[in-house]
């Protein structure tokens, strides 16, 4: 059997033990959430049903609830140092609401549950597994933080939110509203980059939005927990599907006496590890919830 063969059967044990629904329920929930959020933004321009006006950068829901991307607000504030313009008070209120939400559930929930580019990069990762491709360019995960810093510097120097001109999420949204042009090229480039150049290259190594939203993840109480890690059979399916596989090992293998909580701010709370584990090792829980001592068999 070739070394690539196990990658073709990721989740097979869970499928046999739990059935299709329990092996994919969190994935289905994520896709429904992503489609629903995008649909709310498009319902107005496409069908005249204005539940939400705006986009993921700034929106108004039902005419009363402002929501603002705190990353965009920060860029606006830095751009204001050059232009002298100050964002409206509603922008600060909207950013506080959004930031409070991600402080609770984990900042990178944005990446796995909200971002419309996530299905594109997930598809590239799935296709790589199906093709048995494991090699690729090795990129430092710190690059995303350098790019985050660069976008803030550019905002301060240029007096504009320049990142939003090339942000794949914004370009996808504009493409859906006004017709694809450069937008489809950028989305395709992200897909091809992840598929042929670097595994999980965009979301895991380069995207400054993910870097920004990882910051509140240091404090969020809602976490994935390897509560039943003693039952782990070392199938490694959780590592195969995780967009940030480095976050799993400390909790799963009690590295240096680590508890069962995946505490890394880079965890996206995507719950694929919960789905594909045939032993139900993982579950959602709270960061500080007590854990019963377990012995590995």
Image (cartoon, rainbow, N blue to C red):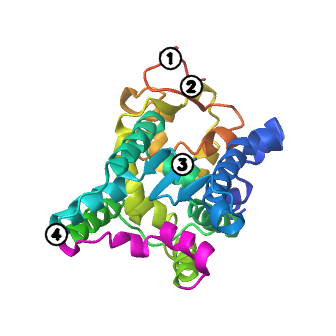
Name the element at disc 1: loop
Name the element at disc 2: loop
In space, the residues marked 1 and 4 are separated at their CA atoms by 51 Å
In space, the residues marked 1 and 2 are separated at their CA atoms by 7 Å
In space, the residues marked 3 and 2 are separated at their CA atoms by 43 Å
Q: Residues within 10 Å of mark 4 (few under 14, many from 20)?
A: some
Quadrant assignment for the N terminus: bottom right
Relative to 87, say whether 193 is above or below: below
Residue 158, numbered label: none
Q: Mark 2 — residue? A: 227
The tag earlier along the polypeptide, 4 or 3, is 3
Magenta stretch? 157-181
User: Is there a contact, CB below 8 Å, between mark 1 and mark 3?
Assistant: no
Name the element at disc 3: loop
Quadrant assignment for the C terminus: top right
In space, the residues marked 1 and 3 are separated at their CA atoms by 44 Å
Q: Residues within 10 Å of mark 1 (few under 14, many from 20)?
A: few
In space, the residues marked 2 and 4 are separated at their CA atoms by 50 Å
Image x and y of residue 19, in percent: 83, 40
User: Is there a contact, CB below 8 Å, between mark 1 and mark 2?
Assistant: yes
Closer mark to the observer between disc 2 and disc 4: 4
């Amino acid at each position: 059997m070739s070394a690539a063969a196990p990658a073709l059967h990721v989740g097979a044990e869970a499928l046999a033990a739990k059935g299709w629904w329990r092996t994919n329920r969190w994935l289905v929930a994520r896709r429904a959430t992503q489609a629903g959020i995008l649909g709310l933004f498009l319902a107005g321009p496409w069908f005249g049903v204005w539940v939400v006006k705006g986009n993921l950068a700034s929106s108004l829901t039902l005419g009363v609830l402002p929501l603002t991307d705190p990353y965009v607000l920060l860029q606006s504030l830095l751009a204001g140092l050059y232009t002298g313009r100050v964002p409206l008070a509603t922008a600060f209120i909207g950013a506080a609401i959004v930031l409070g939400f991600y402080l609770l559930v984990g900042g990178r929930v944005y990446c796995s549950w909200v971002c419309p580019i996530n299905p594109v990069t997930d598809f590239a990762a799935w296709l790589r597994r199906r093709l048995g491709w494991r090699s690729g360019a090795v990129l430092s995960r710190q690059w995303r933080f350098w790019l985050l810093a660069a976008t803030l510097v550019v905002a301060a120097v240029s007096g504009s939110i320049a990142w939003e001109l090339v942000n794949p999420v914004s370009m996808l949204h504009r493409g859906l509203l006004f017709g694809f042009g450069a937008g489809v090229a950028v989305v395709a480039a992200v897909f091809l980059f992840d598929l042929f150049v670097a595994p999980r290259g965009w979301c895991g190594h380069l995207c400054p939005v993910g870097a920004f939203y990882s910051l509140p993840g240091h404090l969020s109480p809602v976490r994935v927990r390897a509560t039943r890690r003693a039952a782990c059979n070392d199938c490694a399916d959780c590592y195969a599907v995780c967009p940030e596989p480095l976050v799993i090992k400390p909790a799963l293998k009690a590295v240096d006496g680590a508890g069962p909580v995946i505490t890394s701010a880079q965890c996206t709370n995507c719950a694929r590890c919960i789905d594909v584990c045939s032993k139900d090792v993982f579950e959602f829980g709270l960061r500080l919830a007590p854990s019963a001592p377990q012995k590995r068999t």
